[in-house]
Every structure is written in C-alpha cells, then in structure tokens.
Image (tube, rainbow, N blue to C red):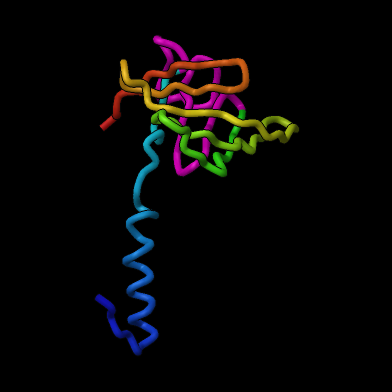
Amino acid sequence: MRLKCNYPSCAVAVAITTILPVALAADPYDGVYKQAANAECSLVGVDGGSLKVENGIFYGVEVECRMTSPVSVNDMDATLYTMQCSGGDQIWTERAMLMLNKQADGIIMVWNGYAFVYDRCADPS
C-alpha cells in the first residue's frame, strides 16, 4: 500500500512515526549494576559503588565510554561495541562485548582478556 502525501507536514509526520519507536526503545543493557555484592547502588562511578549503562554510554569508575558501532555477535545474544573512553586526562578506544546474564538479572561485559559479571541494582522506585 502506498500513501500519497503532498504536504510537507505529512512527510514529517511519516518520518516521525517511522523513527520515533526506534529512538524510544531502551537499550537492553541500560541499567545500574553492582561492582561487587555489597556495592552501594546509589553511588555511580566510584570505588565500592555501581556502574551504569544509559543511552549508549557506559559509566565506570572515573571513566565514561561512548558505546559506538554495535555489532551483533553471531549465534549469541551479545553485542560488540567500540568503546570511546575518557577518564582523568586520557582518551582511548577499545572493543567490549556485552550480553545479558542468563543465570541472573545482570550483564556480562568482556574486554580483551577480562570478563566481568555485574548484577543489576534493584529499581529504587
């Protein structure tokens, strides 16, 4: 079925209804995660606190990484990202793979040679 649209506002409306659901969809990895079992979930980005993934940004201990160039990993429920990181006075780029933990409510994050399992913090609401 093809719609005819002769008005600029109609074209904008079609574009918005096509793009908006994608923009509003939350990333499956979004959330706040404990660094350790006794971590303080309300403290993000500090030792003994928590980590956060939100809107394509990973917030770690004194580091922030933009999660770019996502690639689905074949035959796995995982995503490989290029992490554009900054912390202190340094800027660097690395690759990291994220996947939902199928044994607990959390994520598994794999960096070159390191794997971390983080449990999701309880929703404060």
Compared to residue 14, the image places residue 76 above or below, namely: above
- Tell me the quarter of the picture where residue 47 sits: top right
Question: Front-most of 107 and 40?
Answer: 107
x and y percentages locating residue 8 in the rendered image:
39, 85
Residue bounds of the magenta highlight: 35-62
- The residue at 31%/22% (across/down) is 105
- Residue at the far bottom: name it: 6
Compared to residue 113, the image places residue 27 above or below, namely: below
Question: Front-most of 47 and 102?
Answer: 102
Compared to residue 7, the image places residue 63 above or below, namely: above
Residue 92 located left or right of residue 13: right
x and y percentages locating residue 13 in the rendered image:
33, 74
Q: Is residue 51 magenta?
A: yes
Query: What kind of secondary structure does the magenta stretch mostly adopt?
Result: loop
Residue 2 located left or right of residue 8: left
- The residue at 57%/40% (across/down) is 66
Residue 81 located left or right of residue 37: right
Q: Is residue 6 magenta?
A: no
- Tell me the quarter of the picture where residue 67 sits: top right
x and y percentages locating residue 35 in the rendered image:
47, 16
Residue 113 located left or right of residue 17: right
x and y percentages locating residue 57 in the rendered image:
52, 39
- The residue at 53%/22% (across/down) is 110
Q: Quadrant of the C terminus?
A: top left
